[in-house]
Amino acid sequence: MASAKLRRVINRDRLEADIATEAVRVFAECGYEGASVATIAENVGLSKQNLMYYFPTKQALYQRVLDDVLDEWLARMANIAEPDGQPAEVLRAYIKAKLDFSREHPWGSRVYAMEVISGAPLYGEQIRERVVPLVRKDIEVFERWIAEGRIAPVNATHLLFAIWAMTQSYADFAAQMQLVLGAGQLTGADFADAEETITRLVIAALMPAKASG
């Protein structure tokens, strides 16, 4: 009895994950208003009614998609900016983690970006509760380094904004980059070049000569 119940739970979890995986692509391509639950269901091999047994509304499915995106992003970023770390190494790790997320989860990054660009009408509270405290912690770390003379004096909040803009654009504006590069998609080499370039720019701007090593 218990094993049968466990199998049902596992199967449900897998199906919900499959639905969310397809939904993130459709939301990224069509936006929230343009996305069709019927299309998502068809692509997963379900009827609309069957899909809505698991996600009763489009907003519930959208919420699950954004929850998954945020869970993944926060898991990668949670322990990067440690006060006692070497600033240059922390910045390298931070930039790499953001670019890795853009490379591995481009659809999720775009859905999140579209939600924020529209004013976060459906997900603003979750961002305030989960993202803002982590960002403030990172800002405090950077401000401590500035006070200690370990990095150059800058506005730490806008430093983070600049890193986000440089790294997330490789997901959110990949189509434009592909047109400029004349390529069908961004490659691992493109992301490696981006990581090296962004890291060099940031560290050159922030690292005092005595801390650059």
Image: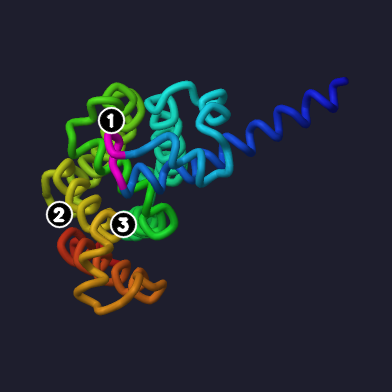
Scheme by which the image is coloured: rainbow
Residue flagged by tag 2: what amino acid is it? Ala
Please, what secondary structure does the residue beneath circle 2 have? loop
Would residue 33 be counted in the magenta stretch?
A: yes
Q: Residues within 10 Å of mark 3 (few under 14, many from 20)?
A: many
Residue 122 in view of the camera:
yes
Residue at position x 26%, y 71% from top?
A: 178
Q: Residues within 10 Å of mark 2 (few under 14, many from 20)?
A: some
Residue at position x 24%, y 77% from top?
A: 181
Task: Give the number of the mark in front: 1 or 3.
Answer: 3
Range drawn in magenta: 30-34
Residue flagged by tag 3: what amino acid is it? Ala
Q: Residues within 10 Å of mark 1 (few under 14, many from 20)?
A: few
Residue flagged by tag 1: what amino acid is it? Val
For the residues bearing labels 2 and 1, Cβ distance under 8 angstroms: no
Question: What is the CA distance from the residue labelled 1 to the residue labelled 3?
Answer: 22 Å
Task: Give the number of the mark in front: 2 or 1.
Answer: 1
* Direction right: furthest residue: 1
Q: Position of residue 31 (x, y in %)?
A: 28, 41
Residue 119, relative to residue 148: is it above or below? above
Please, what secondary structure does the residue beneath circle 3 have? helix
Identify the residue position indicated by label 1 in the image.
132
Identify the residue position indicated by label 2 in the image.
152
Q: Quadrant of the C terminus?
A: bottom left
Secondary structure, magenta segment, majority class: helix
Q: Position of residue 15 (x, y in %)?
A: 62, 37
Q: Is residue 173 found left or right of 98 in the rendered image?
A: left
Question: What is the CA distance from the residue labelled 3 to the residue labelled 2?
Answer: 29 Å
Q: Is residue 129 found left or right of 24 in the rendered image?
A: left
